[in-house]
């Protein structure tokens, strides 16, 4: 079977990261790219050719690209996704024979947007893949597989704690809460919430098997609210956190119920844009009856040291680790971050699923459920109370809820 030809909508940081993942699998290649900035699209196309991931054509629009690819991956800013999906549906209605559509997390800035994307995919008859990479991380899956006999005998994990932290995003739009959907909770909280839910789930059950019961959360603007750091943010990205701030720290607790036996379990999430060690860190641990597991991506088997005399030779600090904040001293080195973080396997899963005529392991309905939990966490932080997810009134409120931070009114919550 020929590889799945994917068309990228967007050519920024995540598109290039996904290319490095695609280069490691056999059943997917890049067929086209469209981006609002043609120079970025040409750059990403050149990288694809360098990596041997196809001979992509740069197109002026989604409509022009859709007839020439098998699937489309949306890697564009969060505020553009509904409009882009509407263009994809129009292309399908005009005759484009697309098999499926991929969306990088989060599915939407809020529940209404996420639900609209699900509806549009259904309208076009498209299979879907929600790209949440941490559920595909080999260390996560390996440790759960190793513990499968203990889980079967003693019971599932009771508590999981997941964290993702780094020094802050690459692009200006990520810092703009009205475009991105919030701050670090919207950006990375979705990762930690998803992987926590997954690690608590009994083996063999669907990712949404455990039923969310309640959410409590806090958000804060700490480092990037200080005058000197606000000024750095303004100077570098043109984003004014004195006027439209977003949180750089979030933490919370979600309680789930096992419908088979009534057991309640808990997942804690912690995320920040103020982490000042080597770079991006994913940290997760879990505890069950008589067993435990732990993951820390900064505990690499490879390390390098660069002294002051040699530091000027460093061209790219992120060559060793995503979001690296230093180019000298003791540095953590990962030889294959795309695989470590799960990007390789999520692409392989999507390609296999679309070629078989089905949605991926994580489809857009799952992405909608993650969006609900993120919005519930914002609601809990705003109201300073635990949100009862079983309450029909709360469920209805979440359908139209837009956090104050996402509205650009973060000062009312954070200051």
Image (tube, helix red, strand yellow):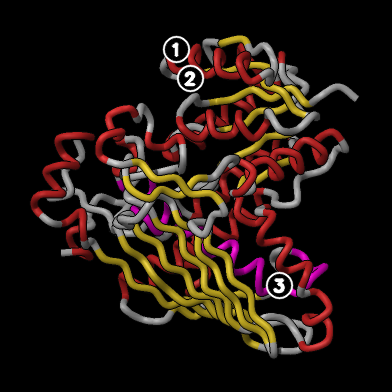
Q: CA distance from mark 3 to mark 1?
A: 43 Å
- Estimate the x, y position of residue 363 in percent, counting from the top left: 70, 49
Left or right, residue 29 beside residue 394 = right
Which quadrant of the rendered structure holds the C terminus? Answer: bottom left
Residue assigned mark 3: 201
Q: Which mark is residue 35?
A: 2
In this view, the residue in front, 79 or 93, is 79
Circle 2 packing at 10 Å, graded few (<14), some (14-19), many (20+), is many
Categorize mark 1 by other alpha carbons within 10 Å: few (<14), some (14-19), many (20+). some
Q: Disc 2 and disc 1: Cα gap in Å?
A: 6 Å
Dividing the picture into quadrants, the one containing residue 343 is top right
Q: Is residue 54 above or below residue 415?
A: above
Residues under numbered marks 3 and 1 in contact, where contact means CB atoms less than 8 Å apart? no
Q: Which residue is mark 1?
A: 38
Residue depicted at 68% across the width and 21% down the height: 53
Q: Which of these two is toward me, 116 or 298?
A: 298
- What residue span does the magenta drawing correspond to? 177-206
């Amino acid at each position: 079977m020929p590889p799945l030809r994917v068309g990228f909508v967007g050519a920024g940081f995540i598109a290039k990261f996904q290319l490095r993942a695609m280069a490691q699998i056999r059943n997917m290649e890049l067929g086209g790219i469209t981006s609002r900035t043609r120079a970025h699209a040409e750059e990403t196309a050149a990288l694809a050719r360098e990596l041997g991931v196809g001979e992509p054509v740069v197109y002026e629009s989604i409509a022009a690209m859709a007839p020439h690819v098998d699937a489309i991956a949306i890697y564009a800013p969060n505020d553009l996704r509904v409009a882009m999906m509407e263009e994809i549906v129009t292309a399908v209605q005009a005759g484009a024979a697309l098999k499926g559509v991929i969306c990088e997390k989060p599915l939407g800035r809020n529940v209404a947007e996420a639900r609209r994307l699900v509806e549009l995919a259904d309208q076009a008859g498209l299979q879907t893949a929600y790209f949440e990479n941490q559920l595909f991380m080999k260390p996560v899956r390996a440790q759960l597989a190793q513990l499968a006999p203990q889980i079967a005998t003693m019971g599932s994990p009771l508590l999981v704690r997941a964290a993702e932290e780094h020094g802050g995003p690459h692009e200006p739009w990520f810092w703009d809460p009205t475009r991105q959907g919030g701050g670090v909770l919207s950006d990375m909280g979705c990762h930690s919430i998803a992987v926590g839910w997954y690690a608590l789930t009994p083996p063999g059950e669907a990712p949404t098997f455990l039923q969310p019961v309640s959410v409590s959360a806090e958000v804060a603007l700490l480092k990037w609210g200080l005058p000197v750091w606000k000024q750095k943010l303004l100077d570098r990205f043109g984003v004014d956190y004195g006027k439209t701030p977003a949180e750089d720290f979030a933490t919370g607790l979600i309680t789930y119920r096992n419908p088979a036996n009534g057991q309640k379990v808990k997942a804690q999430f912690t995320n920040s844009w103020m982490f000042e060690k080597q770079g991006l860190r994913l940290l997760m641990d879990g505890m069950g009856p008589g067993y435990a597991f732990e993951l820390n991506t900064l505990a690499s088997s490879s390390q390098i040291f660069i002294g002051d005399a040699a530091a000027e030779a460093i061209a790219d600090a992120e060559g060793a680790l995503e979001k690296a904040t230093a180019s000298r001293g003791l540095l953590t080195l990962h030889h294959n971050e795309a695989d470590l973080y799960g990007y390789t396997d999520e692409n392989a899963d999507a390609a296999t699923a679309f070629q078989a005529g089905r949605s991926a392991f994580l489809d857009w309905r799952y992405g909608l459920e993650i969006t609900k939990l993120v919005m519930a966490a914002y609601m809990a932080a705003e109201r300073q109370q635990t949100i009862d997810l079983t309450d029909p009134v709360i469920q209805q409120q979440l359908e139209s809820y837009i956090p104050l931070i996402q509205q650009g009114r973060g000062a009312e919550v954070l200051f």
